[in-house]
């Protein structure tokens, strides 16, 4: 990480200096963004916004304090990539359980009343991500987001024991058109209400969302028809795969999913219970912890579990439901007005937890929305940009619902032991393998739009598919020979990235492609860097340009490259040495080869602030690059002025 830009600063570099004239923005009654709910979606959004002192954010939660245990635990590879952008992926990897292999248990062919292992696979395919699939208590993820918020310039903290009572959007409401009435739930002030005015409100308040109800949206879809129990246990067992993620299908007693937990001892068991009748709710069954333990022992036969402690348990119903739109603007009025109220996570899509996607997709919702709110609130982008949130994330949620519906059906089937039924018995394993990219969080592909360009030049970088997340690969940083992942340069700071993969030529030569590029990007008034960077800000304040060369680091010299690739920044005018990279020359690590980049022609890869690829363009497509950004960004006041030439 980079620090000391504006002078030497002792202490922990992950703790930002408080904003000038620090204010307790989370207590304000007039805010830019009000977030309702401190779940994964709410905290992901709050962590993003907390980095911007000029944006007043408040986050409220009806619970009296932060979550301590239970609920979700699966963290996909894609979410780990996102955590890296927030700066705590290493901590999650250190504390969490790594899912390396998944085993499959079904009725033993010679004794179907007993289960036996009949398959095992690598959990994440090679090369899919540099990040692992991790299991860690949702509460710890919350803790890490809360730490990011506490260490941010705004020192943002949640306001607990507050409940939303009413929400209304006034067409003549001025700069803060959303009025929200909140009530206190703490004993000292219980029943007291007060109003907050906001530019934008985001409901991250779960499946019974009060924000969703206030804007007239409804969850629609299948009603619950299957009951499952879940418990986190400390136990002694003779089951041999207790420290592997395991899918167990018994002949007649139901199914279990085993999720080993962090710490080496804790295990989560998802236990299939009875089917529910039409309109029946699981609460009416009065299922106890003893019921869950007994059901687990029946399914585990001939093995058994001796439960010593249960830190958390619950029962739930399977149902897949989705909201028609994720904001407050009716479809017929999209062209007439902009959204001011949004919903994210369980507030707009619900499903079973067995595929491990609930927390992950919810955080993805917030990561998508956060940078868009920052861009609009700071005047970088037109408010039309906010319509893209619902369009993009509802499509993702729809795919999740379809996947979960089929996965839940397969996991609830009774395997057969006849020869004819052998194929049915392996459905779970086959479906798991087939949809491995989905469960890893890598299946999201945003459709062409103002933010996602056409695939006209996709062949220039076939491994960086437009609309998908930026698939990181190894590089060597030129200035200090540090081996690193190029994707790790993307931080959750609402900036765009342009990666310039340079053609096969001498970049030092006069008139080289990279020199012509730098002349355009940093000198030409038509350049998106010049047009959209505020006057007086660093060149990379809005669009961060980085170059990747094919040559070995020993064949290049930073001081002979264009000066814009080692820009001066900050109040002291210090040099940023971290903009230039070389391909790793070791076998199997060349980014040009790994990602199918055209060596002779090179290309640009444009990456959104949430790590998704917006465009691939030829290296000399200056007008195409300018036109792309011009579709949704607003020119900055004064524009950025260069002080040096790229000689």
Image: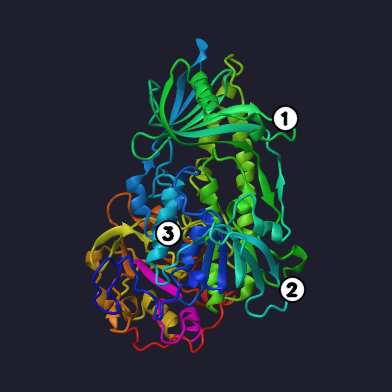
Q: Nearer the viewer, mark 2 or mark 1?
A: 1
What stretch of residues is rendered in magenta?
A: 524-548
Could you tell me residue 482's position as x and y percent?
Answer: 25, 61
Q: Nearer the viewer, residue 181 or 516?
A: 181
- 419 left or right, relative to 538: right
Secondary structure of the residue carrying numbered label 3: helix
What's the distance in space between the residues labelled 3 and 1, CA to CA? Answer: 41 Å
- 596 left or right, relative to 263: right
Rendered position, 386 above or below 6: above
What's the distance in space between the residues labelled 3 and 2, CA to CA? Answer: 37 Å
Q: Nearer the viewer, residue 532 or 232?
A: 232
Rendered position, 132 above or below 4: above
Residue wearing tag 2: 336
- Mark 1: give few (<14), some (14-19) or many (20+) Cα within 10 Å: few
- Mark 2: give few (<14), some (14-19) or many (20+) Cα within 10 Å: few
- 465 left or right, relative to 555: right
The numbered mark at residue 580 is: none
The numbered mark at residue 146 is: 3
Residue wearing tag 1: 277
């Amino acid at each position: 990480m980079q620090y000391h830009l504006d002078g030497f600063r002792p202490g922990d570099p992950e703790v930002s200096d408080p904003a000038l004239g620090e204010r307790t923005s989370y207590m304000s009654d007039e805010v830019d963004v009000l977030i309702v709910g401190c779940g994964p979606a709410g905290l992901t959004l709050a962590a993003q916004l907390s980095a911007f002192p000029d944006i007043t954010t408040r986050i409220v939660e009806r619970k009296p304090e932060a979550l301590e245990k239970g609920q979700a635990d699966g963290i996909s590879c894609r979410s780990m990539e996102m955590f890296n952008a927030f700066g705590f992926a290493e901590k999650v990897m250190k504390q969490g359980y790594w899912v390396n292999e998944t085993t499959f248990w079904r009725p033993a062919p010679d004794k179907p009343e007993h289960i036996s292992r009949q398959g095992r696979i690598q959990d994440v395919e090679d090369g899919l991500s540099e990040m692992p699939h991790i299991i860690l208590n949702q509460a710890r993820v919350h803790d890490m987001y809360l730490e990011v918020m506490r260490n941010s310039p705004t020192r943002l903290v949640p306001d607990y024991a507050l409940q939303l009572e009413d929400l209304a959007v006034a067409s003549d409401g001025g700069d803060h058109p959303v009025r929200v009435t909140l009530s206190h739930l703490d004993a000292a002030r219980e029943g007291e209400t007060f109003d907050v005015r906001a530019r934008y409100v985001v409901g991250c308040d779960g499946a019974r969302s009060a924000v969703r109800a206030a804007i007239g949206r409804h969850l629609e879809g299948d009603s619950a028809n299957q009951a499952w129990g879940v418990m986190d246990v400390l136990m002694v067992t003779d089951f041999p795969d207790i420290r592997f993620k395991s899918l167990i299908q018994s002949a007649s007693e139901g199914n279990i999913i085993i999720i080993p937990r962090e710490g080496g001892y804790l295990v989560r068991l998802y236990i299939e219970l009875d089917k529910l009748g039409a309109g029946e709710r699981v609460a009416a069954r009065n299922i106890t912890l003893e019921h869950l333990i007994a059901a687990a022992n029946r399914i585990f036969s001939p093995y058994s579990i001796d439960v010593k402690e249960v830190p958390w348990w619950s029962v739930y119903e399977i149902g897949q439901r989705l909201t028609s739109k994720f904001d407050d603007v009716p479809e017929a009025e999209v062209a007439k007005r902009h959204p001011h109220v949004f919903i994210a996570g369980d507030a707009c899509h619900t499903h079973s937890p067995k595929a491990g996607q609930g927390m992950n997709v919810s955080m993805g919702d917030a990561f998508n929305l956060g940078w868009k709110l920052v861009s609009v609130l700071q005047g970088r982008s037109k408010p039309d940009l906010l319509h893209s949130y619902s369009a993009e994330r509802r499509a993702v949620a729809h795919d999740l619902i379809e996947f979960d519906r089929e996965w839940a059906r397969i996991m609830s089937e009774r395997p057969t032991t006849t020869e004819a039924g052998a194929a049915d018995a392996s459905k779970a394993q086959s479906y798991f393998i087939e949809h491995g990219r989905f469960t890893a969080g890598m299946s999201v592909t945003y459709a062409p739009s103002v933010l996602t360009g056409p695939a006209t030049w996709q062949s220039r970088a076939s491994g960086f598919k437009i609309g998908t997340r930026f698939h990181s690969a190894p590089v060597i940083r030129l200035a200090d020979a540090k081996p690193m992942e190029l994707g790790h340069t993307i931080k959750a700071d609402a900036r765009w990235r342009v990666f310039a993969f340079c053609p096969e030529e001498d970049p030092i030569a006069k008139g080289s492609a990279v020199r012509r590029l730098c002349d355009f990007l940093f000198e030409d008034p038509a350049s998106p860097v010049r047009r959209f960077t505020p006057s007086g800000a660093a060149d990379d304040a809005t669009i961060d340009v980085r170059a990747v060369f094919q040559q070995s680091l020993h064949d290049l010299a930073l001081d002979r490259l264009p000066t814009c690739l080692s820009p001066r920044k900050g109040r002291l005018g210090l040099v940023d040495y971290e903009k230039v990279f070389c391909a790793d020359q070791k076998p199997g690590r060349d980014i040009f080869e790994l990602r199918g980049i055209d060596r002779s022609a090179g290309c640009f890869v444009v990456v959104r602030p949430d790590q998704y690829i917006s465009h691939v363009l030829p290296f000399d497509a200056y007008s195409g690059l300018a036109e792309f950004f011009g579709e949704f960004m607003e020119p900055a006041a004064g524009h950025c002025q260069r002080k040096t030439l790229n000689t």
